[in-house]
Amino acid sequence: MVAEVAPDRLALREVHRFGNAPVIVAGTMHTDVLRLYEEVLEGLRTAAATAEIASVGIDSWGVDYGLLDADGALLGNPVHYRDVRTAGAAERLAAMIDPAELYGITGIPTIPINTLCQLVAAAGTAQLEAARTLLLLPDLLTYWLTGAVAAEMTNASTTQLLDVRTGRWAAEVAEQVGLRPDIFPPLRNPGDIVGPTLPEVRARTGLAALTPVTTAASHDTASAVVAVPAAGTDFAFISCGTWSLVGVELDRPVLTKASRLASFTNETGVDRTVRYLRNVMGLWLLQESIRCWSAAGLRVSLGELVGQAASSEPLRTVVDADDMDLLRAGDMPARIAAACARAGQPVPSEPGQTVRCIIDSLALAHRRAVRQAQQLSGHSVSVVHMVGGGSRNALLCQLTADACGLPVLAGPAEATALGNALIQARAHGAAPADLDGMRALIRRTQPVRRFDPSGSADLWDAAARKLGQD
């Protein structure tokens, strides 16, 4: 994405889009990071041919990492967080360090996808033994572009290895689980200037010699929250894509037992805010269902499926969207049908009913997370901002408003790219200096749709009781 930022202008232009399918080799699911890097270079080449680029910044999903050896070479393709190797890792971690103690240090509950659980699962492997540096994916790509080694704060906070109280690596946690603290690189903040690209990168992309790489809020949700067009602080956010990240923005972490048991994370946001949120399985459920139907020869577009869902009976069947049985790749429609059968609910008999079940269930999960975020943090909410790709799904937006009993303001869909660009622009003096100013610029320049609750609270209360959520 190429962004143009000015006092009253914020515009995005897509210059290159590419897939990001994991690759399974010998039974292990990997992120094909070398292919991603090639695509990044192609995107930079296209961007440099069509615009004068003032800065480059990278964000991605969290928790996944690459390991470098003593020469700075990558030790194999990173393992994807959905790989089965983390099965049982949470239990092994709990035997090494008390979960309550761990949460009190990191503010992150133990979830199998966390970097820490991945490292526990990798204990004793030749790669981890040979590793001298661990880089999360945006930091790895930045290293290949610039040669500079560091870890950006917002993404580092997703690892369950950052001390939420001090903003430093939690060396005592690393040592307690048998990790060498020296594999974790120096930390940097969003907006730090990394430096110019390497000569080989400039030769392949056509970027000007002094074009800097600037540290964005490299966790995609951190960038997305920057671009939430909120006026004031009484808002909840849902960054809705493959995952739905549902929460509130705070100025201090919540480290209570109730917060830990509810699986709320205290992730570092821009300007040392706290993204107090719960991970909800998100549109992964729909994406994986569509992949399965396509593989079986059923050619139905997303729009057609959502249209069928809209005309299906509402709240006929709901499942717990946070059921860990739904985390892995596989036959998602069959898993959802099995979950319905176990709960004694009607089993979807056609794709439209399955999609309606998914969207109803996501709206219920959004409701639960928004309510819990308020209860656990003491932070009241009068509006829900939904950003990311899911904000384009009008049915999901309306059902979320109905379930929460709150207005939903949907958009921008490209919140992550906008937030990334604003942090870069601020570092170079081209954007407002604070979050309020950046969000005001979003409100002035980006379209937002409003969805008001329809007054069906009793139906949603009954659906929540089916899942034991009320």
Image (spheres, rainbow, N blue to C red):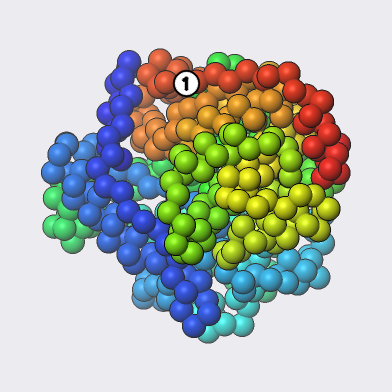
Between 361 and 1, the residue placed more toward the observer is 361
Can see residue 133? no
Can you give x and y, in whole percent of width and height, for residue 452 in the image?
63, 18
Residue at 74% across / 57% down in the picture?
Answer: 339
Q: Quadrant of the C terminus?
A: top right
Can you give x and y, in whole percent of width and height, for residue 283 in the image?
56, 46
Residue highlighted by disc 1:
448
Between 104 and 454, the residue placed more toward the observer is 454
| Label 1: how many Cα within 10 Å (few below 14, some 14–19, many 20+) | some
Can you give x and y, in whole percent of width and height, for residue 252 in the image?
69, 34
Left or right of 182, for residue 364: right
Kind of residue sitting beneath label 1: Val
Q: Secondary structure at mark 1?
A: loop
Residue at 82% across / 31% down in the picture?
Answer: 461
Can see residue 294? yes
Can you give x and y, in whole percent of width and height, for residue 309 in the image?
58, 39
